[in-house]
Amino acid sequence: MIENPGQNPPPGWYPDPQTSGMLRWWNGGQWTNDIRPLEAFPQAPTGSGGGLRPVSDWMTETFRLIINNVAAVFTLLVVLLVPASLVSALGLWYGIRDLVIRIDENAPAGENPISFEGLGPLGFLAVALVVNVVLTFVFTIASTRLIMSGRFESGFAWSRGLTSGIRSFFPILGWSIVAGLAFAGFIVVFAVAAVALGLVGAIGIFLAVIVALVGGVYVFGRYALAFTSPMVAAKGQRSIARVHQLTKGRAGGTIGRVGLLVLVSIAASLAGSLVTGPLAAMGGGETFNPDTEVIRFVDLLGGNLGLFLLTNLMNTVVSAVSLLVWHIGLSLVFEDLGGTVDPELRDDASGAGSTPASI
């Protein structure tokens, strides 16, 4: 083993220069706070470029980072998500609570069978929803960057995380839109192909649907990093082409981890529904009946504003936690694959010692 100061070794587990008998994760440019006993890796792996850590270690690190930064994230939640939730809930309450939709099944041919009554201030509702989306997006960015900075010794305080989130809002929003349009374009291409193949018969449609499903899972699983990496990536990393390069030869492991995060997010949402469902029922909300001819939103929302606000807030928090697990998990995958962490996240980080030696 010799020191190689001219070129950083690739990401991987290396002997911890600070604590004997331990391994510390080197992300390719900086020591992190993630350490493991040497006994867990008897042969003391020295890391290889773009090596994905075991799934158990990856998930453990995901939740460890969130838990270790829970106080700062909670502060951001109070500052950003609570107002976002209250604004959107009030917008819904006063915008559509008195809305009635009537469906006339006996309407003459050519006439619109659907009519609306009791429309509230839709402008206020639209503004409330926009405010909710913006504040929620800023919370996601700020919390993700704050938590990822916690991998280094100079982790962000909540105020710096908030500043970083606001400063990164428009660049990340722009790239997220581009990445989203690219993914939507992929779906449209397969939809068009399905229609075209449908002209040759049912077999063509069936095959097109199968190809679309398999292709969609593959593309989403492999390139979902493009939706997360901008939150932690340095300049030059924000492209689907870069994600393609990083996942080359490791698509299976990446897709499997994305699928696991999807399952975790679904499980969190279902767990949240077990709490908010009964709470919403206490407010008088009724289940939507698709066979009804008159839809009264006051029946769906219930008559208790306080419970409606509380239910909406709880749903917002559950969604936020699911988003954080998703973004932190993918951010760690991005880092494991060799993606460059934004230097801002490790400013003034002293590291754990010298650069690891290379063979």
Image (spheres, helix red, strand yellow):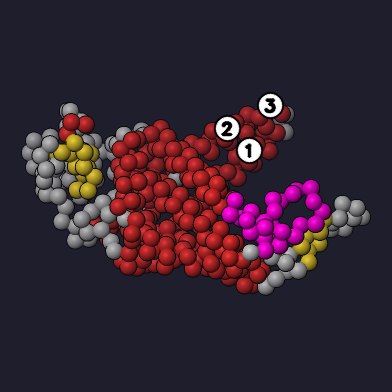
- The amino acid type found where label 3 is placed reads Ile
- The amino acid type found where label 1 is placed reads Ala
Q: Position of residue 47 (x, y in %)?
A: 21, 36
Mark 2 touches mark 1? (CB < 8 Å) = yes
Q: Secondary structure at mark 1?
A: helix
Residue depicted at x 56% and y 52% = 276
Q: CA distance from mark 1 to mark 3?
A: 13 Å
Q: CA distance from mark 2 to mark 1?
A: 10 Å
Closer to the camera in the image, 226 or 107:
107
- The amino acid type found where label 2 is placed reads Val
Q: CA distance from mark 2 to mark 3?
A: 12 Å
Residues drawn in magenta: 278-303
Residue depicted at x 20% and y 31% = 41
Answer whether residue 172 is visible to the viewer in this image: no
- Residue 232: quarter of image: bottom left
Residue depicted at x 39% and y 42% = 244
- State left or right for residue 99 relative to residue 304: right
Answer whether residue 261 is visible to the viewer in this image: yes
Residue depicted at x 63% and y 64% = 304
- Residue designated by label 2: 211
Q: Nearer the viewer, mark 2 or mark 1?
A: 2
Of labels 2 and 1, earlier in sequence is: 1
Q: Secondary structure at mark 2?
A: helix
